[in-house]
Amino acid sequence: MNALVKQHLIDPEICIRCHACEEACPKDAISHNSDNVVVDAGICDGDMSCIGPCPTGAIDNWLMVAAPHPLETQFEWMELPEAVTHSPVEAQPDPPARDATSTTKKRRPPKIPAPASASEPVINLHTPSRPVEVEVQGNYRLTGEGTEADIHHIILSLEGVDYPVLEGQHVGIALPGKDANGRSHAQRRYTISSPRDGERPGKGNISLTVRRIPGGLCSNYLCDLKRGDKIEITGPYGASFLMPNDPAARLIMICTGTGAAPFRAFTMRHQRVMPEVTGALHLFFGARSPDQLPYFGPLAKVPDSLLTKHFAFSRVEGAPKQYVQDKLREDADSIAPMFGQPTTHIYVCGLKAMEKDVEAALAEIAASTGQDWDKLRDEMTNSGRYHIETY
Amino acid sequence: MTEAWEVSYDTQIPNNIGLSSDRRVLKALEKWHPGYIDWWKGSGPDGFLEDLVYLRTAISVDPKGWAKFDYVKMPEYRWGILLAPQVEGRVIPCGQHYGELAWQEVPGEYRSLMRRLIVIQGDTEPASVEQQRYLGKTAPSLYDMRNLFQVNVEEGRHLWAMVYLLQKYFGADGREEANELLKRQSGSEEKPRMLGAFNEETPDWLSFFMFTYFTDRDGKMQLEALAQSGFDPLSRTCRFMLTEEAHHMFVGETGVGRTIQRTCEAMNAAGITDPNDINAVRSLGVIDLPTIQKKLNLHYTLSLDLFGREVSTNAANAFNAGIKGRYQEPKIDDDHMLTDATYPVAEFTDGKIMVKDVPALTAINMRLRDDYTNDAAGGVKRWNAIIKKHGIDFELNLPHEGFHRKIGVFEGAPITPGGLVLSPEEWAAKRDEWLPSKADGDFIQSLMVTVREPGEYAGWIAPPRVGIDNKPGDFEYVQIYDA
């Protein structure tokens, strides 16, 4: 699930760095350097304890983001980036695009380029003010009944609708109804888990992978949908986290939970257009247990020659806890030779919490091959070969 | 737990410390209260006693409940005693008692040292209200007037907080000290306030903004240090005070920022590009940037003096005893006892500035002052961003630590804001280039006209970007009583 929430941010132009919010936050989500006070999107749960103590109102800013601004970026700001709304109830996503094939004026080019051989994405075709209606074709629970993770596979028909997608892109969900203040709900985004030509070739549909969040407005709405229901969507969104078309490309895909969505799409695409290219895809996938790992069954059927699978489970009785970064270290030999190759692409998708640990593991593997990870990562990032999408 | 979060209004004094069941302290405070109200009427804001001011009152110390806004007449403001909730099992964060359970009563051996620290802190609170007594009459807007009064009532509450500690934990001596706090007067010949900077007058609004930015920030740092105290009631008191202190920082930083903003706007509108063309800028009815730098130099250096001597045995004793910690003590990665650590401190000998490593334990004041300087530099950076945004070639800077000092190693040293050592004669000849002259003060004074239309601002200051409590631009923050 890549439902990208409103990010809570502090306006550096108004903030006076009194740290009253930092003291008030029960989650310790707020920290500072000498210039700015910042909110960690991975920790903040919108508890709002910080709002009252702020003497300036700087604390009360909410921005829709494709990927949360990391702390390092926030530390550097002298002002908030554009397209910020100044109160949570006014939060609205992207500005509307008039021309489907170009970005809007306000939209900046993605900081991280897409892979050089990626197809050109279409973005912002359907805007929040002009969403498009689609029909639900199916809704299946992917995880074992009774397990904690209630993850659904939801198929939407695109028949008669102009909605071209690429693997790795997102769909915006326009929730029906109004919030308590009579405004439209802020939209949520989910990564498409099917390849560009549909769940089955030429079917003209897309699938989403959605985890039900207790109390979550959008995830419950989606998980409760029935076949034949009509919903409104916006997008597509995303122009960076895309897959390369180059048959020589090698992909290391690292994910947890619903972070598998784009990799399902990548794998299916590869299987359809270049089944003869083997050894190209490597998946590291973490979940609590096999029955809480979405697509565990179907994944097992993908031949190893096409996709090597490295599962890590953190809650299996009788087995030590293993996280995806542990698996990376354990199976380092299988991917180490790819480090430093110009054809290697690394993708990370899933919970924010894993980002640091995964990177530490990657750094170790790089070091074991005598390479400087910082340098390698920057080089890969700048050439569109290192992508992170965490939430 | 819930009880400690609610503020009790069932006695005359709002509190979350179970005052009604503590007859001795309640009686002492009720006895002190009339004197306090008299002091407020005689030394607090001159006039405005009948006016309705849109103020924030703490109704509980829970982050969601302590900022309640409403109109209130200042003498009827509910000054209360509020402590941050007790943290179960809190330990002393520094000094020789490091790791021991925090004290709920004052240990006998530290009684006088602790009392002195509380009295000094307490003395600054009413002092600043006295210093700002006449400012209401020249407020550049109702918004600013309201902010001034909010600062004033909260300084009043901080006095209450210190008085509570004195009366609750220090017996007859404490009661005596509490009374003395109402007797000393800022700027008085016979009974002045205890610290120098709190006997200087606050003649105009730019001074007020500079004072709240630089001098109240010293207060913030002292509170931060006392919030680390092993004496838990003091720590809890200071932690809640810090939440309010933030408003004072806000008034200062945005006040100076809005002044700069207006100056830059006026310069651009008139096509003046040279910020040093002081006469041309002043003719626009705004305060030129070089004069703002001079005011900054003055208030910053007065505030540095408040930290005391760079190397101090008293400070070492207070740290070692666990009475006063360092800024954000728990976040510092060391032994919290400073057994072998050293800290760099500047020295001034034979006309040369040298930096020397001294035992960190004796350099506690210096360390806090360095943290202060870092904290203060943040706002200067924002102010410079405003100037830069308007395309004006000028940069504000914090002066050298040796400039214009009256306490510590640089006392009386003829050092420039840039850190050059001059002869005393050369320094004196250039004094007015660095510090506000009488003429500068007169000019600023000439701009101090009162504006009382809601949403209107005096010509030398820009409106704020955001209203208090999210109120619209033309909100009537003070309803002036029209007799």
Image (tube, grey):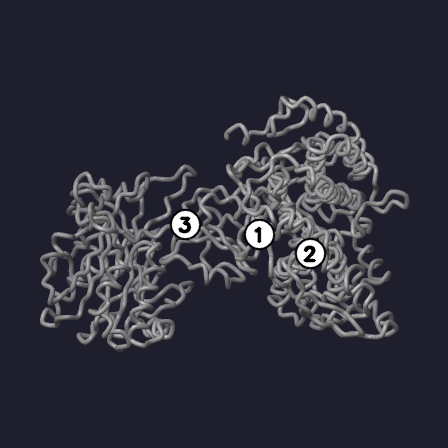
Instruction: Pick whichever, B235 or B103, lies toward us.
Output: B103
- The image quarter containing residue B437 is bottom right
Q: What chain does badge 2 belong to?
A: B
Q: In the rendered structure, find residue B328 and report the number of the disc placed on it.
A: 1
Residue marked by disc 2:
B365
Q: Position of residue A228 (x, y in %)?
A: 16, 43
Quick check: B459 above or below A276?
Answer: above
Q: Amino acid at mark 2?
A: Asn
Q: In the rendered structure, find residue B274 and report the number of the disc placed on it.
A: none
Q: Position of residue B146 (x, y in %)?
A: 69, 42
Q: What chain does badge 3 belong to?
A: A
Residue at 38% x, 68% y: name it.
A111
Could you tell me if the residues under marks 3 and 1 are in contact, i.e. CB atoms within 8 Å? Answer: no
Residue marked by disc 3:
A43
Quick check: A31 above or below B143?
Answer: below
Q: Is residue A257 left or right of residue B184?
A: left
Q: What chain does badge 1 belong to?
A: B
Could you tell me if the residues under marks 3 and 2 are in contact, i.e. CB atoms within 8 Å? Answer: no
Q: Amino acid at mark 3?
A: Ile
